[in-house]
Image (cartoon, grey):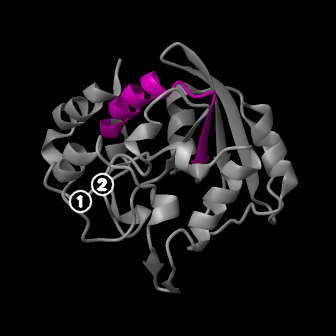
C-alpha cells in the first residue's frame, strides 16, 4: 500500500463526516513512510477547524507538524509555536528515544474535533480505525505511543481490540501507571505503550519512561 491511497480510503470510510471539523495527520505527509514509532492521541481539541474533507484533500501536501509549528491556546494561556506544555512533553518523549518529532508520524485515534473527550462518541474510533490500519501498513512501526491509557483512551481502545498481556510500570507520578502490551497489527509485531494523558502528566526528566520506550524500538 502507498500513502497516496490513504485520502481515498478516508473519504470512502468517513463519507458521513466530511463536513465536520477534523484532521488525520498531526505530522507532515513526509512521515508517511517506514518509521519506528507511530504517535497517537485521542482526538483534535478545540473548535472551528477546517472541514474534514478539506484536510483530507490537503494531507499529502502538508509539511508542518502540530507539535512543533503550531501556536496552541487553552483556558490557561497562549503559547508560541511548539511551546505549549503538551507539545513540549511530546517533543521530550520522542527526543528521549532518539527521535525528532518532525520525523514521527502522528495522528489521533478519532479524527473529528471536539473540546473534550466527553463531547465525542467513542464509537467513532471504530469508524476511524481502518484509516489507521492503512497508515500502519505504510509506516510499519515497532512502537505505538498512545497518550491516554484509561479505559476510554487510544491505549484502551487498542487493548480492547487486540488483547494481549499487559505490563504496568510506575509513571513517577502518584498512582498513575505506564501500561503496555505486544500485539499483531496487519501481521506485524507492535508494542503498544500507553502513557497517562500528556495534558496532565509530564514525563519530562523521568528516565524510566525513556528507558522503557527505548527497549521497544
Decide if residue 205 is in sight here: yes
Residue 83 placed where, x, y %?
Answer: 57, 73
Q: In this view, does 105 lie to the left or right of 145?
A: left
Question: Regarding mark 1 in the picture, which secondary structure is present there?
Answer: loop
Residue 114 position, x and y percent, is: 33, 65
Please provide percent x and percent y for residue 57.
19, 44
Say how many tags the image has: 2
Q: Is residue 199 visible?
A: no
Q: Which of marks 1 and 2 is nearer the N terminus?
A: 1
Residue drawn 14% across the image and 40% down it: 15
Relative depth, front residue between 2 and 197: 2
Q: Which of 201 and 99 is in front in this view?
A: 99
- Spot occupied by residue 71 in the image (x, y as percentages of width and height): 45, 73
Does residue 68 sit above or below 79 in this rendering?
A: above
Q: What stretch is highlighted in magenta?
A: 127-146
Mark 1 Cα shell of 10 Å, populated few (<14), some (14-19), many (≥20): many
Badge 1 is on which residue? 21
* Residue at 54% in and 68% down: 82
The span from disc 1 to disc 2 (Cα, nearest Å) is 6 Å
Q: Which residue lies furthest to the top in this view?
A: 187
Is the Cβ of the residue at disc 1 closer than 8 Å to that at disc 2? yes
Q: For the N terminus, which image quadrant?
A: top left
Amino acid at each position: 500500500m502507498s500513502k497516496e491511497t490513504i485520502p481515498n480510503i478516508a473519504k470512502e470510510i468517513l463519507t458521513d463526516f466530511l463536513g465536520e471539523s477534523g484532521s488525520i495527520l498531526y505530522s507532515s505527509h513526509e512521515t508517511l513512510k517506514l518509521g519506528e514509532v507511530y504517535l497517537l492521541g485521542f482526538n483534535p481539541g478545540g473548535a472551528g477547524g477546517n472541514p474534514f474533507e478539506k484536510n483530507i484533500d490537503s494531507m499529502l501536501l502538508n509539511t508542518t507538524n502540530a507539535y512543533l509549528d503550531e501556536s496552541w491556546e487553552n483556558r490557561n494561556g497562549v503559547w508560541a509555536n511548539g511551546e505549549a506544555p503538551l507539545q513540549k512533553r511530546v517533543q521530550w518523549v520522542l527526543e528521549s528515544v532518539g527521535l525528532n518529532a518532525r520525523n514521527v508520524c502522528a495522528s489521533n485515534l478519532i479524527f473529528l474535533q471536539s473540546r473534550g473527550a466527553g463531547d465525542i462518541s467513542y464509537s467513532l474510533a471504530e469508524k476511524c480505525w481502518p484509516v489507521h490500519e492503512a497508515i500502519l501498513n505504510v509506516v510499519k512501526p515497532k512502537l505505538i505511543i498512545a497518550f491516554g491509557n484509561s479505559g476510554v483512551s487510544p491505549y484502551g481502545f487498542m487493548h480492547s481490540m487486540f488483547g494481549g498481556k499487559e505490563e504496568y510500570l510506575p509513571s513517577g507520578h502518584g498512582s498513575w501507571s505506564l501500561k503496555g502490551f505486544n500485539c499483531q497489527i496487519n501481521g506485524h509485531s507492535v508494542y503498544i505503550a500507553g502513557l497517562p494523558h500528556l495534558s496532565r502528566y509530564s514525563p519530562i526528566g523521568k528516565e524510566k519512561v525513556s528507558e522503557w520506550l527505548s527497549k521497544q524500538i
